[in-house]
Amino acid sequence: MKTIRDVFVEYKAGLAQLYDSQEAEAITLLAVTETTGFSKAKVKAFPELELSPLHADTLEDILSQLKTGKPLQYILGTTEFYGLPFKVNPSVLIPRPETEELVEWVINSVGSLQLAAGSILDIGTGSGCIAISLKKNLPAFKVTAIDISAAALQTARENAKLNQVEIDFINADILNSIAEIVNHKSEIIISNPPYVTLHDKTQMHANVNDFEPHTALFVPEDDPLLFYKAIADFALENLARGGLLFFEINESYGNEVVQLLNDKKFNNVELRKDLSGRDRMVLGCAGTGGLYE
């Protein structure tokens, strides 16, 4: 009979060409816990525990798929984000830990500024992880989420149902006018838009390049702030007075995004690092004059 230890040995050898030992161990641990239902503590404490033939076969199949570079989250069909379950598939990006930090910043800002409940707009929602997490933690807010991908929106709707929240999902392209579709002002606009350049692409792991949706990732090399410009212009017209614009950003363009928002007369623009010390998030506040009167 195959033991938990045997699985860890097989996965480490099988994934050596794709992941470092720490990543391989984390992937193995998740695969074992999701397959068997055992807790992480149990898996770590009892490596000689024998697996049922069904579980052993399932883990062998998962390893075969992992060897192709397919991300474990797509193989399992689920992941966790901000403590909530989400369905994922190749039509949506796999939610990242740094995006959880962006969600945390929004929630903390609402509390610290005592922002009155109003509307939140998530631009480029993908799996819906941002919109759904915000609605779950700020239930008094009306949340609208848009995406250019109909397939992504279908997944997002399933995730909203899974997490028992009401979100208004809209199929729209921010690079074309959506003012007639989203016809109300928002207290918060948030976006994790495409920001990976072709140069960045050469540095990325194969499991991202080969499996995650390119329309949600890549921007032209000669216009890396394409989506930030469009969203900032949209926010100038569609943020409520005193409203907040939050971005997740490419760490290489933090100063450029800050300058962009300053040039467009956003106030109190702030660049924030993630827990890894990388420039990853920007906040701008709508002013109280001009367009905001």
Image (cartoon, rainbow, N blue to C red):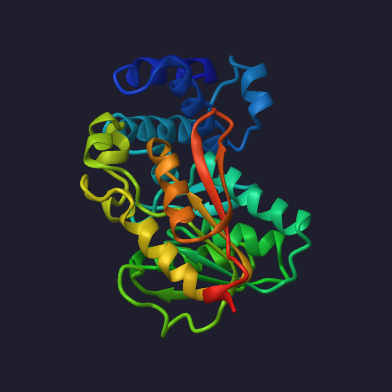
Residue 102 seen from this side: yes
Total labels: the figure holds: 0
Closest to the observer, 204 or 227: 227
Q: Residue at (35%, 15%) from the top-left corner?
A: 13
**Residue 28 picture location, percent across and down:** 48, 26
Q: Is residue 263 left or right of residue 142?
A: left
* Residue 168 seen: no
Residue sitting at 52 percent across and 15 percent down?
5
Which residue is rendered at x = 35% and y = 47% of the image? 195
Q: Is residue 269 above or below residue 171?
A: above
Q: Position of residue 211 (x, y in %)?
A: 29, 44
Q: Residue 293 lies in what quarter of the image?
A: bottom right
Residue placed at 34% from the left, 16% from the top? 16
* Image spot of residue 143 (x, y percent): 59, 71
Asked if residue 257 lies left or right of residue 110, the reply is left
> Is 84 left, or right, of 18 in this rendering?
right
Give coordinates of residue 15: x percent, y percent.
35, 21
